[in-house]
Amino acid sequence: MGNLKKSIGIVGCGTIGRKVASELDAGAVPGIVLRAITSRNIERAARFASTLSCRPPVVELESLVDMVDLVVEAAPASAMDSIAVATLSAGKDLMALSGGALLEREDLFNLAERNGATIYVPSGAIAGLDGVAGACFGRVDSLTMITRKPPEGLKGAPGVELCGVDLDALSEPTVVYEGPAFEACRLFPANVNVSAALSMAGLGPHRTRIKIYADPTVDRNTHNIVVEGEFGRLSILIENIPSDTNPKTGKMSALSALATLRRIASTVQVGT
C-alpha cells in the first residue's frame, strides 16, 4: 500500500495523547509524522516530549496548527471548542476524540466546509460503525447502546452527581442514566464519547438511546449495541480493558485513533 505523507500535531498529553504520540514516534503508522505537541500543562508536555526520539517541539495551540496538516484533539471535552475553531479556521483537518462536544455543532461543521477541512471522529472504544452506517441508509426502527462500567470509571461525572448514586456503596449493577445520546454526552463527557460516534454514524443524538450502568461486578468497560430495522438485527458487544492510568478511558480509544490515522494516510480504503 502506498502512503501519503501527513504531519500531525497532538493536543493533550493524557492517556490517549501519550499513547498516540509514542506509537507514532516508534513508526507505527507509515506516512504520518508527529510534528508538534501542546497541552494545558506545557511543562508536563515538554517532559513527555523529551522522552520521544523525534523530540517534537511543545508549542502553543496557534503555532501547532500552523505547523501541521492535521490536529489530533486528545484533550478534555471542555477544550474542544477552542481547538476546533483554531484548527478549522486555518483550513486544517481535525481528529476529534471528544466527539460528544461536536453534537449539534453545525457551526463547526460549516466552518470546516467553508475552509476545505475534514473532521474525523474515530470509532473509539466501540466497533461496528460501518454496519450501523450501512443499516441506517435504509429504515432503522431502533438504535440502542447499553454501557456498563466499574464504578471507579464513572467518578466525577455530572450525571452521577445528578442521579445521587453513591458509587462507593454499590453492591449490584445500578442504572445511572437512560435516555438520548445527546444528554449522555453532556452528563458523562469523559465516559461515553462512543455514544457520540454511534449517533453520528446512525440516527443522530436524539434518536440514539443510551443506558449506562455503574456495575461493581465487571472489571471492563462494556458496550452492547443493538440496531433493528428493515435489514434485520445487528448486535455488537465489546469489552474494553480500562487504561492503567485513567479508568475512564479504555485502551481501545487510542488504538482506534491510530487506526484512523493509518486509514487517512493509506491509498487503500477498506470497509464502509
Image (tube, rainbow, N blue to C red):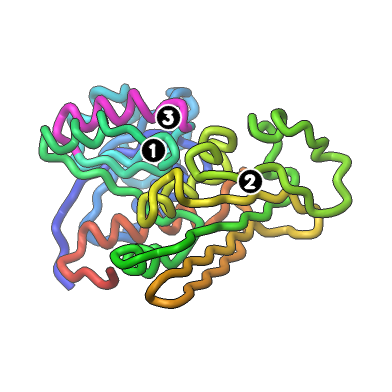
Q: What label does residue 178 carry, if any?
A: 2
For the stretch drawn in magenta, what is the main secondary structure? Answer: helix
* Badge 1 element: loop
Looking at the image, is mark 3 or mark 2 earlier in the sequence? 3
Where residue 243 appears, as percent x and y from the top left, is 60, 51
Image depth: mark 2 or mark 1 in front:
2
Would you name the residue on which mark 3 appears?
46
Q: Nearer the viewer, residue 196 or 180?
A: 180
For residue 74: magenta?
Answer: no
Q: Nearer the viewer, residue 61 or 248?
A: 248
Q: Residue at the bottom extreme?
A: 232
Q: Nearer the viewer, residue 221 or 29?
A: 221
Residue 22 seen: no
Looking at the image, is mark 1 or mark 3 earlier in the sequence? 3
Q: Is residue 109 left or right of residue 231?
A: left
Residue under the image location 26 percent in, 44 percent down? 119
Amino acid type at circle 1 is: Leu
Query: Quarter-wise, where is residue 74 in the image?
Result: top left
Q: Which segment did they paint magenta?
A: 77-92
* Badge 2 element: strand
The residues tagged by marks 1 and 3 sit, at their Cα atoms, a distance apart of 32 Å
Residue under the image location 42 percent in, 29 percent down? 46
- Binning the other alpha carbons within 10 Å of mark 1 as few (below 14), some (14 to 19) or many (20 upward) gives some
Q: Is residue 7 left or right of residue 48?
A: left
Query: Quarter-wise, where is residue 55 in the image?
Result: top left
Where residue 98 appears, as percent x and y from the top left, is 43, 39
Where residue 126 appears, as percent x and y from the top left, is 49, 60
For residue 84: magenta?
Answer: yes
Q: Is residue 115 left or right of residue 252?
A: left
